[in-house]
Image: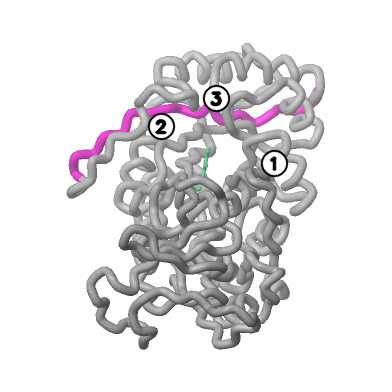
Amino acid sequence: MTEPTPAVRDRALSLPSTELPAYIYDLAALRTHAAAVRDALPERVELYYAAKANPEPEILAALGPYVDGYEVSSGGELAHVAKAVPGRPLAFGGPGKTPEEVTTALETGVDRFHVESGHELRMLAELARRFAPGRKVAVLPRVNLPVADGSLQGSSLAMGGRPTPFGMDPAQAAPVVRALTDGTYPHLELRGIHAHLASGLQAAEQLAVAETVVTWASGLGVPLTEVNVGGGMHVDYAEPERRFDWVAYGRGLARLAERHPQLTLRIEPGRALTAYCGWYATEVLDVKHSHGEEFAVVRGGTHHLRTPATKGHDQPCSVLPVEAWPHPWPRPAAGGERSEPGASPDGGRGKVTLAGQLCTPKDVLARRVPAPGLRAGDRVAFSLAGAYAWNISHHDFLMHPRPGFHFLNAAG
Ligand SMILES: *Cc1c(COP(=O)(O)O)cnc(C)c1O
């Protein structure tokens, strides 16, 4: 779904130039997608949204009916999400939790803690004794399990089990699990196991991960009620129409759940839930030739949409032609005939690199996009801008104005 939805297209074309660039979200598209994901999952699988992918309050609220809770990874996210979707279950994860954050989380009544190390467990135990007397705080130790699956065709899947700051090695997790079950920490309760081992996995790979985590957790020989197998479902920026196969994943999780009737399985995707509902819409400011290549400079750039720079891809986009040119000076245009979409590309002609306004060669949103005849004043809508987009970007670099934000189809 590279093409903007009709509502997004209308908004991208009707905003005055001075109100571009803009992030435009289609909340109806988000609700439809989230409902399809929820429908594909068996009832016994809980769906948490990893808020770090996109914590806009409107997004959190729109996801509300389809998710069982939210995963937060900092005190900031915790406060923000608790305010945006009050009363919803929160899981507090992430490395380097501070004593202040943990205390606030305990006072806020966070539902469960994903504990990243033995040190964090000991801190949590003491703070729970002081700040959450009279109740048991639910803990899921995070494990960094080796997962290498040669059975996945063509995939060099070998993730988890590598040195990282996240979670605990299986050997370190064992004493943590023991301490949570032998009465060492009367204010804590071992609720289950958490793992988030990789990102960008297809359904078959995700199922192999889930199988590994559940098998390991069951082998601990202690009573567990939950296993959280993480997020990281693939989003294909090169071929956006190739979506993660939620139906196959859901069927696989159903089989896994059947074999472990005492367990609640949980997943916590971020990117694959919200990437598709957001567009970054902007306007071409200048079109120029440089040593045999064509460039279009657009309003804004990677300081608003850092995703293509961090992931090293071309952000998928659509050109929205604008006929009017209100200025008395000539209108620059790229070479090649402006033609029907899908017309055969004529060699290098008509390929345009879309760059932003920053004074760095890294400020490129998409390279060599087929856009024959692209003109200043035409508009461009970058898709898959609903996750890890605005909120991971270095907004203040070069002090350009911030984009607008538009949440369309807010009513359900
Ligand atoms: C980032 C993160 C997620 C979500 O990952 P996506 O790739 O956005 O699905 C889930 N769990 C944890 C612990 C994370 O850090």
Residue that label 3 marks: 116
Residue behind label 2 places its C-beta within 8 angstroms of ligand 1:
no
- Magenta part of the chain: 133-151
Residue that label 1 marks: 77
Q: Is residue 16 left or right of residue 348?
A: right
Vertical placement of 279 versus 46: above or below?
Answer: below
Tell me the CA gap for discs 3 and 1.
17 Å
**Residue 340 in the image, given as x and y percentages of width and height:** 36, 87
Residue in the picture at 33% in, 34% down: 159
Q: Is residue 289 left or right of residue 224?
A: left
Task: Give the residue type at disc 1.
Answer: Glu
Q: Are marks 3 and 2 in contact (CB under 8 Å)?
A: no
Name the mark nearer the viewer: 3 or 2: 3
Residue 146 colored magenta? yes
Name the mark nearer the viewer: 1 or 2: 1
Please tell me whether mark 1 sits on a helix, a strand or a loop: helix
Tell me the CA gap for discs 3 and 2.
19 Å
Residue in the picture at 45% in, 41% down: 229
Residue in the picture at 59% in, 76% down: 8
Most frequent secondary structure within the magenta stretch: loop
Residue in the picture at 25% in, 81% down: 344
